[in-house]
Amino acid sequence: MEFCDECGSMMKADDGLWVCGSCDFTKPKGNSDAYIVTEDQEASEVIESSEESALPKTETRCPECGNEEAYWYLQQIRSADESETRFFICTACEYKWREDDN
């Protein structure tokens, strides 16, 4: 999805161009995987990430290597009336396992 640089309206794809329906601004579609930082963007709008996971850590034993620390997250993988599934990723060997409330 693209938004107009001039008025902020949602743009529509037309052949090799993005066309604004509100102000007739156009720009080439280009590579959708490329990110462009304009002069109008502030430094606070640019998100940087580090190599370390942003997931929280907990003390639990890895069934693969015996390490005592793992990252964890919750995910709803069954129907909405059942509890979430806890996933763990070992901080040492990156083995991934899950725990269900059964």
Image: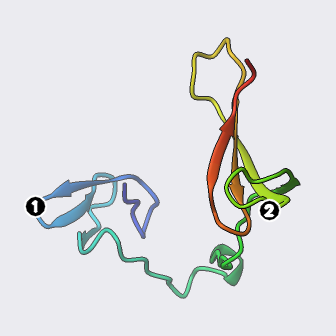
Q: Which class describes the residues within 10 Å of circle 2: few (<14), some (14-19), or many (20+)? A: some
**Residue 14 at x, y percent in the picture:** 14, 57
The amino acid beneath tag 1 is: Asp
Disc with the residue nearer the chain's start (1 vs 2)? 1
Which residue is disc 2 drawn over?
67
Considering depth in this image, is 80 or 22 the residue closer to the camera?
80
**Residue 55 at x, y percent in the picture:** 74, 58
Q: Is residue 14 left or right of residue 101?
A: left
Residue at image coords 43%, 77%: 35
Residue at image coords 31%, 68%: 32
Q: For numbered disc 2, what is the local secondary structure?
A: loop
Considering depth in this image, is 22 or 68 the residue closer to the camera?
68
As drawn, 42 above or below 1: below
Residue at image coords 57%, 28%: 77
**Residue 5 at x, y percent in the picture:** 42, 70
Query: Label for residue 47?
Result: none
As drawn, 31 above or below 74: below
The amino acid beneath tag 2 is: Asn
**Residue 28 at x, y percent in the picture:** 22, 73
The quadrant the C terminus occupies is top right
Residue at image coords 63%, 16%: 80
Tell how many labels: 2
Please tell me in which quadrant of the rendered image residue 48 appears. Answer: bottom right
CA separation in Å, label 1 and label 2: 54 Å
Q: Are marks 1 and 2 in contact (CB under 8 Å)?
A: no
Q: Nearer the viewer, mark 1 or mark 2?
A: 2
Which residue is disc 1 drawn over?
15
Considering depth in this image, is 67 or 5 the residue closer to the camera?
67
